[in-house]
Image: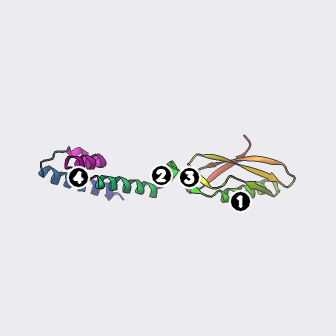
Amino acid sequence: MAGSPLLNIALALADHHRVRATGVNIPAALAALLVPVYLFQRQSRLRQNYAIPIVWCVTFLVSLGGAGVIGNTVGSRWTRTPSKKQIATDVQAQTGEAVTVQCPSSATVCTGASFQCVVKAADGSTAIATVTVQNSQGEFIWHIGP
C-alpha cells in the first residue's frame, strides 16, 4: 500500500513528460500532487473524452469504500434484527425479565444516526430504547430513556 502513492506519482509524471512532448503544457505539480485535476486538464487540452479521469475517480472512491470510509460517511444498508436480539438479551441479563423488542424495518443508516425501538415487558409496560449506529458494520450502542 505504501508504494501506491509513489507509483501513482511516477506514472503521472511519466505521462506529463509524454503530454509535454506533444506541445501541451500542464504544470508538473498537478501531475504529481493533484492527479485527478491533472487528468481532467490533460483530457481537456488534448480534446479527448473524460473516460480516464472518470475511471480514476471511480476507482479511488471504490478504494475508499474498501476502507470503510464511504460506508461510514454515506451510510450502508443493514438489518436491525441483530440490534433487537442484542437489546432483548441485554435487558434480560440486567433485569432477569424477558422482553420483546420492536425496531423499525431495515434501512440505510449513517454512522452516528439513531433510531428508536420499543421494549415491551411481559406485564405490558414499555420503554423506548435509543439505538445509535457506530460504524458501517452495524455495531451500535443503545440506552433506555431520553
Asked if residue 29 lies in the magenta stretch, the reply is yes
Q: Which residues are magenta?
A: 26-49
Q: Give the residue type that dot 1 points to.
A: Lys
Q: Nearer the viewer, mark 4 or mark 1?
A: 4
Query: Which is nearer the N-term, disc 1 or disc 3?
Result: 1
Q: Give neighbour class at mark 4: few <14, some 14-19, many 20+ (Cα, 10 Å).
A: few
- Marks 4 and 1, how far apart at CA: 55 Å
- Marks 3 and 4, how far apart at CA: 41 Å
Mark 1–mark 2 contact, CB under 8 Å? Answer: no
Q: Quadrant of the N terminus?
A: bottom left
Residue to which mark 2 is pinned: 70
User: In the structure shown, which secondary structural element does the residue marked by tag 1 occupy?
Assistant: helix
Q: Give the residue type that dot 3 points to.
A: Asn
Q: What residue is drawn where x is 85% and y is 55%?
A: 122
Q: Give the residue type that dot 2 points to.
A: Ile
Residue to which mark 4 is pinned: 48
User: In the structure shown, which secondary structural element does the residue marked by tag 4 occupy?
Assistant: loop
Q: Give the residue type that dot 4 points to.
A: Gln
Q: Give neighbour class at mark 1: few <14, some 14-19, many 20+ (Cα, 10 Å).
A: some
Residue to which mark 1 is pinned: 85
- Marks 1 and 3, how far apart at CA: 18 Å
Q: Position of residue 3 (x, y in %)?
A: 31, 58
Query: Which is nearer the N-term, disc 3 or disc 4?
Result: 4
Query: Which is nearer the N-term, disc 4 or disc 1?
Result: 4
Left or right placement of residue 37 versus residue 16 in this view: right
- Looking at this view, is 5 or 102 the one in front? 102
- Looking at this view, is 103 or 9 the one in front? 103
- Looking at this view, is 76 or 33 the one in front? 76
Q: Nearer the viewer, mark 3 or mark 4?
A: 4
Mark 3–mark 4 contact, CB under 8 Å? Answer: no
Residue to which mark 3 is pinned: 135
